[in-house]
Image: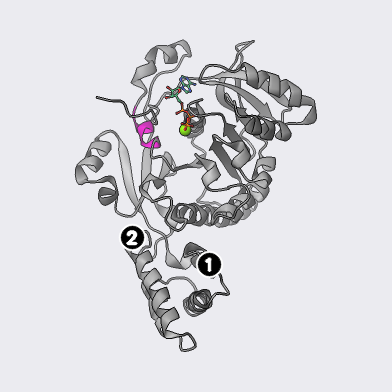
């Protein structure tokens, strides 16, 4: 069990049973404490040292977890805790110094205990469909047909490894396509090469992940509007870990050694990745995580301001809810629909009473409990405060 806080009436510790895989939804209005709570859960998981931890960080705020929370020493003391920085590895799509605006930024962050890794995707890890989705072209459009064929051919010939350059060469060889189609497609592939998120030598993604600390995927450096690149990165990572955990699980069942422990992945601003009412590159894979992730040992935490903007299939799979202050009726209704009937009216009443940041309602479907709690203070520094005038 991981402790999240204390029951507001009885002061008993309250938490989430984590022996089995869980799908957790953290929601609440702006500034209600969602990212903070997500950090608390990850501090707890990190202390247990038995799972791989990944945070998908669209705002670039989780690097501060490498530092101790000096600002709340008193509260921590009241809780019998002391401040501590966690081992944090930031995976930066592309070249870290370039994306962060200088070597000095990297050096300063390193001096605060952050480790950096450039994160680059293997072109061959993307399916032909994903390549078409990435450029927003249909698989039956003129360009889509050529691209699909090129990637498919490379997959057949090389089995595993190929790079953006190889796709360009393969497209050039296509004799059935019109000149203009080829040119337009090659332009897009060259653009993809310039994004600097595809690798030019094959490397297994999971090899660079730290098994003992928190792996932060910093998506704030990737333009959100650009062809669903953020989604693509999440999709490739989620798919890779799904596949690897399926293999690892089989080994564990046979009593053999496996090199990959269970995985907890947290996604902040989750509506960007599993939106309601429209497709996204990562959606299908994430739906699979929450629906079928129990067997391979994959847990997911989704944090969002707008639960009503999350895909309903994903919402309905969440078996733990942490609800912070919510004011929007549409979002409150979305949450109520999720809770068991017998809890619905009680939940609504409790949510209305929430006032301070850090207060939340925990609904655990498995344990069939509904508790109002105060989330504990963070031992590591919380990022994400607003910029203030100097
Ligand atoms: N459990 C807590 N104890 C003490 N302070 C807290 C707690 N939770 C949140 N806070 C305070 O509230 C502020 C806002 O929290 P947080 O950044 O987690 O909000 P959020 O819900 O993620 O907001 P946004 O929707 O803007 O992302 C924090 O900077 C922190 O100071
Ligand atoms: Mg937040």
Please indicate whether residue 383 sits to the left or right of residue 368 in the image.
left
Please indicate whether residue 165 sits to the left or right of residue 272 in the image.
left
Q: Quadrant of the C terminus?
A: top left
Image coordinates for residue 373, horizontal then vertical, percent = 59, 18
Q: Is residue 291 visible?
A: yes
Image coordinates for residue 98, horizontal then vertical, percent = 26, 51
Image coordinates for residue 219, horizontal then vertical, percent = 41, 47
Q: Nearer the viewer, residue 288 or 44?
A: 288
Please indicate whether residue 84 sits to the left or right of residue 357 in the image.
left
Q: Main secondary structure of the magenta part?
A: helix
Q: Is residue 63 magenta?
A: yes
Q: Quadrant of residue 173?
A: bottom left
Q: Is residue 264 visible?
A: no
Q: Nearer the viewer, residue 73 or 18?
A: 73
Q: Nearer the viewer, residue 173 or 255?
A: 173
What is the magenta range? 62-67
Q: Is residue 309 magenta?
A: no
Residue where numbered disc 2 is placed: 196
Residue where numbered disc 1 is placed: 127
Q: Which mark is residue 179?
A: none
């Amino acid at each position: 069990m991981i402790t999240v806080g204390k029951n507001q009436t009885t002061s008993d510790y309250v938490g989430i049973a984590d022996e089995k895989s869980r799908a957790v939804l953290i929601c609440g209005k702006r500034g209600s404490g969602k990212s903070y709570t997500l950090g608390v859960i990850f501090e707890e998981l990190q202390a247990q040292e038995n799972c791989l931890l990944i945070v998908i960080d669209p705002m670039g705020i989780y690097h501060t977890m490498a530092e101790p929370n000096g600002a709340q020493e008193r509260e921590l003391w009241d809780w019998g805790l002391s401040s501590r920085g966690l081992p944090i590895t930031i995976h930066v799509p592309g070249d870290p110094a370039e994306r962060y605006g200088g070597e000095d930024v990297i050096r300063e962050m390193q001096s605060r205990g952050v480790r950096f890794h450039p994160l680059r995707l293997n072109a061959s890890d993307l399916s032909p469909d994903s390549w078409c989705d990435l450029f927003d072209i249909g698989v039956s459009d003129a360009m889509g047909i050529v691209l699909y064929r090129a990637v498919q051919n490379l997959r057949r010939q090389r089995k595993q490894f190929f790079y953006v350059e190889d796709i360009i060469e393969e497209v050039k060889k296509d004799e059935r396509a019109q000149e203009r189609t080829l040119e337009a497609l090659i332009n897009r592939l060259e653009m993809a090469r310039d994004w600097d998120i595809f690798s030019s030598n094959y490397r297994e993604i999971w090899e660079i992940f730290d098994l003992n600390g928190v792996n932060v995927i910093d998506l704030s450096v990737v333009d959100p509007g650009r062809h669903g690149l953020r989604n693509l990165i999440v999709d490739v990572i989620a798919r890779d870990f799904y596949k690897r955990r399926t293999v690892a699980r089989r080994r564990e069942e046979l009593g053999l050694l496996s090199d990959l422990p269970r995985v907890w992945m947290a996604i902040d601003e989750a509506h960007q990745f599993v939106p309601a009412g429209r497709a996204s590159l990562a959606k299908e894979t994430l739906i699979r995580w929450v629906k079928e992730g129990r067997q391979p040992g994959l847990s997911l935490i989704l944090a969002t301001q707008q639960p009503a903007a999350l895909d309903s299939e994903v919402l309905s799979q969440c078996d733990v809810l942490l609800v912070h202050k919510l004011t929007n009726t549409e979002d409150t209704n979305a949450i109520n629909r999720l809770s068991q009937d017998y809890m619905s009216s009680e939940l609504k009443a409790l949510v209305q009473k929430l006032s301070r940041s850090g207060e939340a309602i925990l609904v655990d479907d498995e344990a069939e409990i509904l508790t109002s709690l105060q989330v504990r203070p963070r031992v590591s520094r919380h990022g994400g405060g607003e910029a203030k005038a100097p």
